[in-house]
Amino acid sequence: MSLKVDNLRVYYQTLQGPVRALDGVTFMVEDGEIMGLAGESGCGKSTLGYSLIRLTSRMRYIAGQVELDGKVVPIWNDKEMNPFRYKQVSIIPQYAMSAMNPTRKIGRMTAELLKSRGISYKRTLPEFKRRLDLVGLSENVLEMYPIELSGGMKQRMVMVLSTLLDPSLLIADEVTSALDVASQKAVSQMLVEFRNRGFVKSMIVITHDISILYQIADTIMIMYAGQLSEKAPTEEIINSPRHPYTKMLISSLPKVGVKYSEKKLSGIPGKPPSLLNPPSGCRFRHRCPAAFDKCVEDPPFIEIDEGHFVSCWAVFQEEGLDIDQVPAEEGPPGAQILEEALAKHV
Amino acid sequence: MTTATAPPPAVAIKKRNEFLYFALRNNKLRVGLIVVLLFLFLALIGPLLTDYPPNDYVGPPGAPPSSEFWFGTTTFGQDVFTQFILGLRATFLVGVVGGGLGTLIGVLVGFVAGYRGGIVDELLNMLTNIVLVIPSLAVLLIIAAYLEVRGVLAESVFIGFTSWPWAARAIRAQTFSLRSRDFVDLARISGMGSMKIIFGEIAPNMMSYLFMTFILQFGGAILTAATLDFIGLGPTQGTSLGLMMNNALLWSALHLGMWWWFVPPGVAITAIVGAMYIMNVGLDEVFNPKLREM
Amino acid sequence: MFKLEEISKVYRVGTFGGKELRAVSHVSFEIGKGEVISLIGESGSGKSTIGKMMLQLTPITSGKITFKGTPVSGLKGAALKEYYRHVQGVFQDPFSSYNPIFKADRVFENVREQFFPTVDDARWDEKLRESLRGVGLNPDQVLNKFPHQLSGGQLQRLLIARALLLDVEFLVADEIISMLDASTRIDVLNLLADLKARGLSILFITHDLSLGYYISERAVILFKGYVVEMGSTDRIFSTPLHPYTRMLMASVPRLDKKWAEVEKEVRPEESQVEELPAGYTFFDPEVAREIGGSGHRPQPVLVEVEQDHLVACFEPGDIPPTA
């Protein structure tokens, strides 16, 4: 019972050509695991989140396989995905709390949502009310309009709605960004609570705020320019990261207790590469202090320590692996296959 | 021998030159402009191509286009071509004057209301709503009863004074949203005055919007004029494309197969207004750098 | 250098302006030369409004702001322009700060037109390049480009460079890095710290406690428009006293301690709003206004509980022994 993603490639079709937003991503999320997915803007984390549930109009599935609880998830086919959505895989999209129809009372909106999925509102109502209570919302909320709820309340509301059918996998996309500090804490802790009570089996929490992940995630996966850099248990990522990018990223974050005058932090010089025409091999190599000649080949994402995955030749060398024996990641599909895949509109 | 090196290009690129550069290279702008200018040219040299006044009965009634009458004749034997050429002139005049006046008033009211806000905004809003609500046709009937002779100019002015409210509203809304953007604040702390900000920062951001407003006013003015002409409230003498089309309709040109009567004016109106819309799309690309790179 | 005395900003809302909205309420503090003060608060705390009032982008409803002794509200025309020579601002959204249809250079052009009309092209070019290098940018990479062709970090640095073209002594930095990526944030922040070392005073407006701690020695914590705690960052962060500050400290996600651990240290539950002793209300200006009349609680005054640590609280709780 878990999520397995194998060599997933999803590109965006644009007028200037395909943007290689997700280029060969392979990882696993265990049952009961809350995995944080972090990275800077443009790294592909949102693309990854969305491709697991619904490809938007500009996304093109190119290659790769997704398996949930042993079954293949047909992300390339919109119709076939329907039975999976909301029931097995659910998402809390980024602007969910502002996307509620302002002219519908919450109760009515929920009923419409459930009906569209073929589920009876009446029968789900008792469980629904129980969960609302759990997150600290009273029953009266069903009779209110979205505008009467605060940001934190709306977000909690959306969380309950998205997990009403106990999905196997929940994708939470930037659910805490627009909230004040106290609500952020409440919502984050609620995510953990949902997992603890079995409302969801596993979770992928997408955010750019690594400190939230430190607080609630079991593991953190760092992405850079459409590829995976590192995945490890939270403590290890924060306190003993291995990938150069992760190291530089973590050390550029101000923490309470660190002053400029005592310890000046530094950022990462340079800019992420354009994904229209990304460099071959490791996409971080132009900014990486540890880059060497092997880096023109794409490093695979392999486990160097228990539960600790890295995609970096320098790290492999440090671990004593013979890098000539380690197969590089395969490149993108050939031009013809690519063209065909891009032409297929989901 | 040292070659004199030019000083490094001045940091400040003159914005006027830059827009002109892109404007001249934009296809949509060029095509649209050519079409409009073509018709304009036709309208200007028109009278030279024809010998007789438009409403005289000069030829056989209902005759199709021939070498003598290029656009054929109407049911009464009037030369369609003459009517067309002179109608083109009147139409352009109404569009430019009526549309232009409407745009001018609307833009001024909109800018001031949007930028100043507060009580000025409230007052101008009231004014806009009042003018919007007045039934212009009723007013025109009253005016028509008092004026013995009406020219195209009078008609244009009237249209201008009654069609500006929606433009004012649109411009006000845009100004409002632009005004609260940070770059306006930045301009203020750079010491720039209000007028300079409105015309230097806000207006250029809305250039395509302003032009679009003019296009719609232009087209609307032409069509309004056609309606007025039809019910007899138009100029007491003369002809226009709108009048031609309405007459053609009145005299069953379609049923009788006299396509040469309504097709030229219809095509002309469509072509002119359509060309202006295309110009506007092109203009949007010129002024919006992000669209340019596509 | 700057002195704010009992600053308030009141908006009239509702039909015919019948209701009042107090965005800022009797705020007072001072900023000296070469000092960086962090104005910390969440959205709705009034921190941006204070910045705007200092920049005279919005009028002060009551109170006084003085810059080197001269009141700021009366400034108009030439005097205001002179003020802008010394006091500048950088805002939160780098892409909104630039007029999208013009090249980014236009912000420099405007400054040149207004403040340096007589300087010739060559001299201006040199001055501009120097300023850009001073903020860590390569002039050839950033000049002559449109805003959407540059990154958020570059745009913010351009704005700082713009301010440095003048004889700026004071900078209002309103959440200038919150919209930037993590790896560029620290570079811009370090730039501000460098400038401070060179004598620039900064009002650093932010909602992020750790940023405030990193860059400034003194902090002002705002809640719904009034100051709840103020003083040296060390004191405030090691012993937060006001219930709101304690709640902030306990809720901010940190990278070194989990929430459970921080809660034990800060003990916010002892200051939970719902659990306060009977008769005590967490001063909320909106609630206070509604109550009005005899039930109206006056806004708590800042009380110095120890050196360089002021709290606006009727019952600040345990006061740790000084030194």
Image: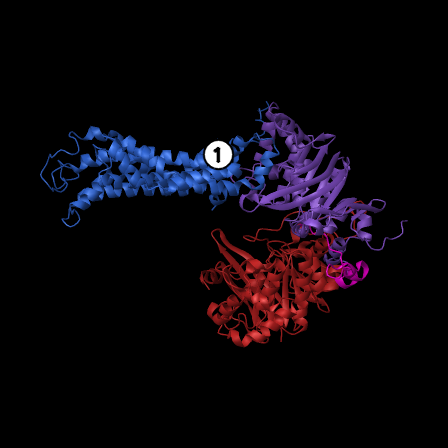
Chain colours: A red, B blue, C purple
Please name the residue shown 66% across and 63% down the image. Answer: A187
Quadrant position of the N terminus of chain C in the picture: top right
Left/right of residue C271 with respect to residue C135 in the rendered view: right
Residue range in magenta is C258-285
Relative to A28, residue C151 above or below: above
Tell me, yes or no, if residue C293 can be seen here. yes
Q: Residue B261 sits in which quadrant?
A: top left
Tell me, yes or no, if residue A166 can be seen here. no
Chain of the residue on which disc 1 is drawn: B
Q: Residue B143 sits in which quadrant?
A: top left
Left/right of residue C238 with respect to residue A334 in the rendered view: right
Q: Position of residue B3 (x, y in %)?
A: 57, 24
Question: Circle 1 is placed at which residue position?
Answer: B18
Which sits in the foreground, A328 or A185?
A185
Please name the residue shown 46% across and 70% down the image. Answer: A79
Q: Is residue C284 magenta?
A: yes
Please name the residue shown 16% across and 29% down the image. Answer: B51
- Label total for image: 1
Relative to A151, residue C196 above or below: above
Q: Position of residue B175 (x, y in %)?
A: 49, 40
Relative to A116, residue B4 above or below: above
